[in-house]
Amino acid sequence: MSDLGRLEDLPADYVAALRAQNLVPLWPSLRAVMPAGKPQPRTAPTRWSYAALKPLLLRAGELTPIEKAERRVLVLANPGHTLEKMQASSAIYLGMQLLLPGEWAPSHRHTPNAVRMVVEGEGAWTTVEGEKCPMGRGDLILTPTGLWHEHGHDGDQPVVWLDVLDLPLVHYLEASYHVNGQRQAQLAMRGDRAFVRAGVAPTPVFERTRKAYPLLRYPWADTKAALQSLAVDQPDLECVMVTYLNPETGGDAENILGFYALMLRPGQTLSLPARSPASVFHVIEGGAEVQVMTDRFALAEADTCCAPGYTPITLRNRSATAPAFVFAADEAPLHRKLGLYEVRA
Ligand code: 1HN
């Protein structure tokens, strides 16, 4: 494949002398680290079926008490990276977490940023920096870098949510660690109406320091309503999509990964251009088909898939009569900050 000199072309004694000095010739490996035209991602298009994983997750609930697990999670691992690496893409980690009635996942904070997309069950909550965030289906809850968080469950059915973290990147940077804490006093039940209207935001004149993350819980009812309003307001709009934002800065909700909700109109096929970041799709309501290169995934409610960057993606609503609602995550904020972000024709 390479038109450059190969390592085998060099005298063995020369290669040995280089190695003894911790030196490596670049040219035999240059094409591998910088391929022509586009990267060669390890991230393989991969689908995870909720129907297939749910019984295995519930079995984890029988096999492993929460005290032995801290977080009872099955990781959605991409075989392209090898399963042991526990990553969906180079920067994205995905896991399905189970909390059973009465259980408590103890308080900690860590450097990777996390979000939770609630998949199933009622009555669980996440306390973030003392604020109790109820977890309802489709709600997005942020636990950004450095903030204390713990999970509890007052309901009577298992609760499952999808965790999305930038753990693979933070680990690669050798910046990943956690600190365990005490059970948080729940200071306040966080209201969810303060930021519900776009275009205006509360103005905290008496606060000396601004909260970096003013909104931690994005209720699904509000996000869904925003998508439905957008679809009605712009009937010709092809991509009915909203970004989860920091409502005070207008910037991305978190620093490294981006989070989005999109609505596919009944029968719609949406072709997205090739963009540099890898992405993840998770069906909140309805059914969708996702085509990435030669792979075509039929996704039912609660199914999840991932796609590498630099490849077009086609999303299709499997219903001709009902809209489909999809949660997406990608590496776009990271790519933009690094100056690497690209959209190809
Ligand atoms: C973590 O803290 C949670 O708090 C879930 O629920 C998944 C995966 C890796 C590292 C930390 C949680 C995690 C995690």
Image (cartoon, rainbow, N blue to C red):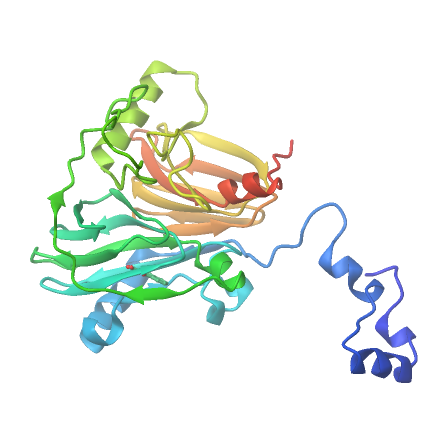
Q: Residue at x 16, y 57 (%)?
A: 184
Q: Residue at x 27, y 31 (%)?
A: 224
Q: Position of residue 58 (x, y in %)?
A: 22, 67
- Drawn side of residue 182 relative to residue 253, left or right: left
Which quadrant of the structure image shows residue 112? bottom left
Which quadrant of the structure image shows residue 140? top left
Please tell me which residue lies in front, 79 or 294. 79
Q: Residue at x 51, y 41 (%)?
A: 332
In this view of the protein, can residue 65 be seen by the observer? no
- Drawn side of residue 237 relative to residue 313, left or right: left
Q: Position of residue 280 (x, y in %)?
A: 44, 47
Q: Position of residue 275 (x, y in %)?
A: 58, 39
Please tell me which residue lies in front, 213 or 312. 213
Q: Quadrant of ligand 1?
A: bottom left
- Drawn side of residue 97 relative to residue 24, left or right: left
In this view of the protein, can residue 114 be seen by the observer? yes
Q: Quadrant of the N terminus?
A: bottom right
Picture layout, residue 30 above or below residue 21: above
- Drawn side of residue 30 relative to residue 335, left or right: right
Q: Position of residue 46 (x, y in %)?
A: 48, 56
